[in-house]
Image (spheres, rainbow, N blue to C red):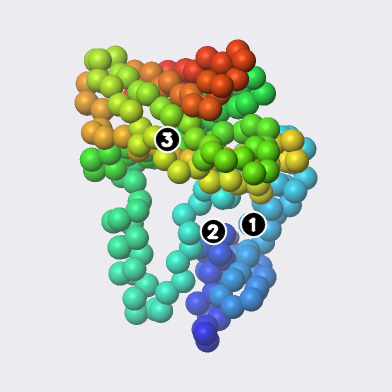
Amino acid sequence: MSFDRSLARCSFCGRHTSEVRRMVAGPGAAYICNDCLELCNDILNDPTPFSAKALELASRPPVVIAAPQGLETERENMRATHEPLRVVTLELEQKQQGMTLILHQMHYYQAHFELHYLWIRPPLTAGFAFVPRIIFFLKDNLGAQWTGDRGGMLLARPELASGPNNAVYQGSARFRPLPAAEARVLTIRAADPLGQFEDPPPTPWQFEITL
Ligand SMILES: [Zn+2]
């Protein structure tokens, strides 16, 4: 595929050559700007078990490279179908029995909302036969209740982990309908269904968020 390099955009942040100090060209239409390179360097030098900067980078919306005439339309379509109306950053973290659950963000759409989370735990052994997942139960202060879509799909994100003793799974659970406008507090309970086989079984995580 031929590519007009005057259209170059950083594959990590989407900015054009004219908006950055330096752009490094990769294969095809891949580019990285000086700011994103510096961020990657910070991630490589981060000694903590979980890099918040790595998550920030991995959570960015994908940069769409399209033919110039279709670019704006394509971006509008992406926005209409995939982008939430409102994103609330939670960054709530709880640890128990060697595992950490991080509630990362809440995404509000027209008729549903999504809870984006990270589950950091010891790696599952090779040949593990189950699909790891977290199940959620939500309740607001008015008594409304939601169960998620079985916790949604979990993606293994080894690149977010700091070493072989950690496995990072990223997931989102979808709930409908939206909470009522008068609801003020949401209690989020989360459990690993396979944890029930452990002895003793872990108590569910519980978070409270203000709406
Ligand atoms: Zn960039």
Tell me whether circle 2 and circle 1 mark residues in contact (CB < 8 Å). Answer: yes
- Mark 3 or 2, nearer chain start: 2
Q: Are marks 3 and 1 in contact (CB under 8 Å)?
A: no
Q: CA distance from mark 3 to mark 1?
A: 35 Å
Q: Is residue 201 visible?
A: yes
Q: Is mark 3 within 8 Å of ligand 1?
A: no
132 or 56, which is in the foreground? 132
Q: Which residue is mark 3?
A: 151
Identify the residue at horizontal 30%, vertical 63% (top origin).
Answer: 77
Judged left or right of residue 188, residue 39 is: right
Q: Which mark is residue 154?
A: none
Please tell me the numbered disc located at residue 35. 1
- Other residues around mark 1 within 10 Å, as few (<14) / some (14–19) / many (≥20): some
Q: Nearer the viewer, mark 3 or mark 2?
A: 3
Kindly report which numbered mark, 2 or 1, lies closer to the viewer in this rendering: 2
Q: Residue at x 37, y 72 (%)?
A: 71
Residue at left offset 65%, top offset 73%: 26
Q: Is mark 2 within 8 Å of ligand 1?
A: yes
Q: Nearer the viewer, residue 30 or 17?
A: 30
Assess disc 3: are there few (<14), some (14-19) or many (≥20) residues with their C-alpha within 10 Å of its C-alpha: many
